[in-house]
Amino acid sequence: MKIKHSFKTAINGLKIHRSRSLLTILGIVIGIAAIMGVMSLGQGAQNLILRQMQSIGPKIIAIVPGKQPKGPTDILSIFSDSLKQKDLEAIKNKLNVPHASKVMPVVFGNESLAFEGETYRATIFGVTDLFAQIYNMYPSNGRLFTEDELKSYANVVIIGSKVKNELFFNNDNPLDKKIKIKGRNFKVIGVLPQKGQSSFLNFDDVAIIPYTTAQQYVFGIKHFHRIVVEADKEENVSQTVKDIKDTLRNSHNITDPEKDDFFIETQVEAMETVGTITNILTWFLAGVAAISLLVGGIGIMNIMLVSVTERTREIGLRKALGATEKDILIQFLLESIVLTIIGGIIGILLGTLFSFVSSLILTKVLGLNWTFTFPLFAAFLGILVASFVGLIFGIYPARQASLKSPIEALRYE
């Protein structure tokens, strides 16, 4: 029997029981749709994060206190006080780090802000005025704090757009108003434009103050949570990293690199790490979603076995008219494969629709710069896996059908 005829016979067999066929492929549809949705949203999330990190620029270097975490047990090591004022001065020294064009200390933490009975918990970001150049974030209204304000521990603050909206209503101009942080009055001297997440910081949800004020009056510390360095040229980033390591090891009297009490992150390394993590999470979630394909395959096998039993007389009649075991085997295998391929196509369409709608919601409702991504590889893989599932779980029922004796099959009631 020709494959073309076997295919037509298989299609006709599925058409007879359309409702049952649709219910049979439900597991495949859900599995493929879930994989498509997870892969699409995972790629969209990765693209969003990488775009945010790229906006800072490849010349930015972050020095983090503590040993670099290499596992879950090392996470507490990043809460270290190893970066001090002497380290900042050493890095600023051009003899030590000649390619460092900008050096900025950073302290940060969450604190409550208050204005006339309204309170809002935001991120306090203690820095110098260099943050505007490094992060390309200048006040849309107001000004930056000055060097004198930095040296005099001034109580001045620049707030993000969300902080403004939460504390000041009716589009009130917050400039020169005073908000309370840790019981101290801070004069609002600037308001940042709406930008959203940028690397590790959401500039809409931040209150920026001089790092000297943050250390002395807000956090009560004498160390830094980060030191951010910008290299003069992108090609000098590697040399700058080396110079920083040598400078800090000399400052901390460290001779063995394994005993470093700091670690350095560049934008390139951070982007590679984020890409690896998001890929692992995406594939893990896709693997979990793929479990439903196994369930769907078992369902197909069960239904195909029922179909073989119901069509015993048909099998006997076809064998009596000259059909071979191979013909019967191919027919039932084709029915199983066609079922799963149809389920795969429906799953791809539903998964794509779900991803597209989710992207619109994330963009329009939450205001994220989210782009819809169609995972072509996932679609191809979905069809391939669906066909494979149909083949594997269709072999046993097809084999059972092909081995039936024509005489016994014709006698079956």
Image (tube, grey):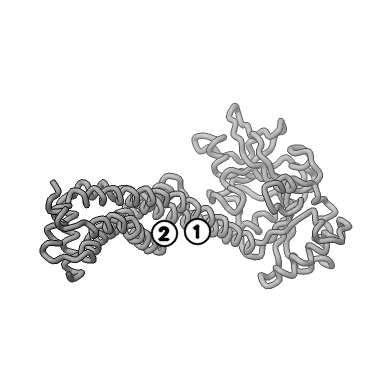
Image coordinates of residue 65 in percent, x first then y, are 76, 51
Of the residues shown, which amino acid type is indicated by label 2? Thr
**Is 144 in front, or is 20?**
20
190 sits left or right of 218 in the view: left
Spatial separation of the CA atoms under disc 2 and disc 1: 9 Å
**Is 209 in front, or is 325?**
325
**Is 215 in front, or is 76?**
76
Image coordinates of residue 184 in percent, x first then y, are 72, 33
Q: Quadrant of residue 124?
A: top right
SS of the residue under disc 1: helix
Whether pointer 2 and pointer 1 mark residues with C-beta atoms closer than 8 Å, the reply is yes
Few, some or many residues within 10 Å of mark 1 (<14, 14–19, 20+): some
**Residue 116 tag number:** none
Q: Which residue is mark 1?
A: 47
Residue 214: tell me if it is visible: yes
Of the image marks 2 and 1, the number of the one nearer the N terminus: 1
x 67%, y 61%: residue: 266
x 51%, y 38%: residue: 171
259 sits left or right of 386 in the view: right
SS of the residue under disc 2: loop
Image coordinates of residue 331 in percent, x first then y, are 21, 62
129 sits left or right of 292 in the view: right
Image coordinates of residue 129 in percent, x first then y, are 70, 53
Q: Quadrant of residue 376?
A: bottom left
Of the residues shown, which amino acid type is indicated by label 1? Asn
Give the residue at the far bottom of this rendering: 235
**Residue 373 tag number:** 2
x 13%, y 61%: residue: 318
Give the position of the N terminus as an image quadrant: bottom left
28 sits left or right of 250 in the view: left
Few, some or many residues within 10 Å of mark 2 (<14, 14–19, 20+): some
Residue 360: tell me if it is visible: no
